[in-house]
Amino acid sequence: MLHITKEKIDLVLQKIKDVMKPEAIGFISLKEGKVEFFDKKTGRYFYLYEPNEFVNILHKNGYVVEKQAVRQPRTHHTLSQSWLTFFVRVNKKI
């Protein structure tokens, strides 16, 4: 999800939902923030989200958030920024 454009996130979440088993739990992790940027070192784009922003996107696409958390920065290079984590399932009512 981290490298998927905000314009395509709904489509990707719908495709994932289409192949999830009825009782499956999914895990999503992405960086927290309000920006998008290109990392010259890795050659990849990054799309960041605020917690409530992504919860709203999940709900709009038919997911129920079972658990969410924010992993705070640590000394490891991949944790120099807060990460959002979500455990989700498909909303059977939609």
Image: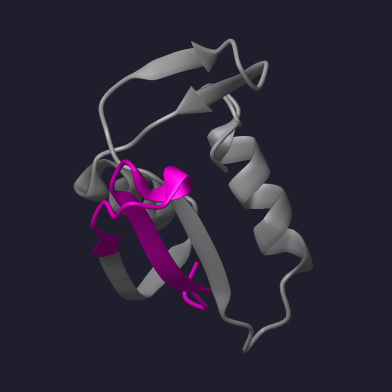
Q: Specify the farthest residue to the right.
A: 19
Q: Is residue 80 above or below residue 16?
A: above
Q: Tell me what residue is drawn at x 60 percent, y 31 percent.
A: 4
Residue at (40%, 71%) from the top-left corner?
64
Residue 9: where, in percent of width, then height? 55, 35
Say whether residue 14 is visible: yes
Q: Which residues are magenta?
A: 70-94
In this rendering, is residue 43 above or below 52?
above
Quarter of the image with the N terminus in it:
top right
Examine the image and state in which quarter residue 44 appears.
top right
Q: Looking at the picture, does residue 2 appear above or below residue 94?
A: above
Looking at the picture, tell me which residue is in the foreground, 13 or 36: 36
Answer left or right for 81 relative to 40: left
Q: Is residue 78 above or below residue 87?
A: above
Residue furthest front as drawn: 75
The location of residue 91, given as percent across then percent down, is 48, 73
Residue nearest the observer in this picture, 64 or 4: 4
Q: Is residue 92 magenta?
A: yes
Q: Which percent across, then down, holds residue 93?
A: 47, 75
Q: Residue furthest bottom?
A: 23
Residue depicted at 50% across the width and 66% down the height: 94
Residue 42, how many percent across, how many down?
65, 22
